[in-house]
Amino acid sequence: MKALRLIVGVAGLGFLLGMGGYAFYQGKGWSYLSDRPEACVNCHVMREEYESWQHSSHRNWASCNDCHMPHTFLGKWATKAVSGLRHSVAFTTGRFPEPIVATPGNRAIALENCVACHRPVVEAMLLRPGVYGPEDLNCTACHGNVGHRGLK
């Protein structure tokens, strides 16, 4: 009986690892460990964002991770892990909005990165979430088409 439980447990673990490995392979999981913008179009819902970014003024200066990931080592990889898991579940179950919408946390990261890159121009402005209230002025309120198509 003990041997049977061990065999079933090892087989179950092997099955889960095999399915996870296959999903990682099919989803081009290794590409997400890079900073290459092409990784973002592994998922079909990001193709419009990628195409519009290629025609934007930011294409020459910033890639997806420059705007959408924290600029600290731990922050970047923690955000990639949480976002990756959330995206995997959403795309596997088909439960995501089209066009895709950034979460409030991801919008806050993008705002911090806007301010960080454009600090000489915006340092006198208080463009930080929560300073005046939930509907604070933010970069994309006026410049929603800068990185790619109208994002708010």
Image (tube, rainbow, N blue to C red):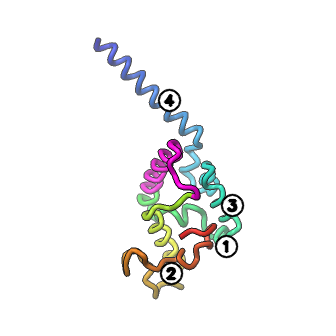
Label 4 or label 2, whichever lies nearer to me, is 4
Label 2 or label 3, whichever lies nearer to me, is 3
- Label 4, secondary structure: give it: helix
How packed mark 2 is, by other alpha carbons closer than 10 Å (few <14, some 14-19, many 20 or more), is few
Residues shaded magenta: 77-99
Amino acid type assigned to the residue bearing label 3 in the image? Glu
Q: CA distance from mark 1 to mark 3?
A: 13 Å
At 62% across and 72% down in the image, what residue appears? Answer: 145
**Is the residue under label 3 in contact with that under label 2 (CB below 8 Å)?**
no
In the rendered image, residue 65, in percent from the top left (x then y), is placed at 55, 61
Query: Which dot marks residue 18?
Result: 4
Q: Main secondary structure of the magenta part?
A: helix
Q: Earlier in the sequence, mark 1 or mark 3?
A: 3
Q: Earlier in the sequence, mark 4 or mark 2?
A: 4
Q: CA distance from mark 2 to mark 1?
A: 18 Å
Query: Which dot marks residue 57?
Result: 1
How packed mark 3 is, by other alpha carbons closer than 10 Å (few <14, some 14-19, many 20 or more), is few
| Residue sitting nearer the eye, 16 or 32 | 16
Q: CA distance from mark 4 to mark 3?
A: 34 Å
Q: Earlier in the sequence, mark 2 or mark 1?
A: 1
Question: What residue occupies the far top of the structure in this picture?
Answer: 1
Identify the residue position indicated by label 3 in the image.
51
Q: Earlier in the sequence, mark 4 or mark 1?
A: 4
Above or below, 151 relative to 24: below
Residue 95 painted magenta = yes
Identify the residue position indicated by label 2 in the image.
119
Amino acid type assigned to the residue bearing label 4 in the image? Gly
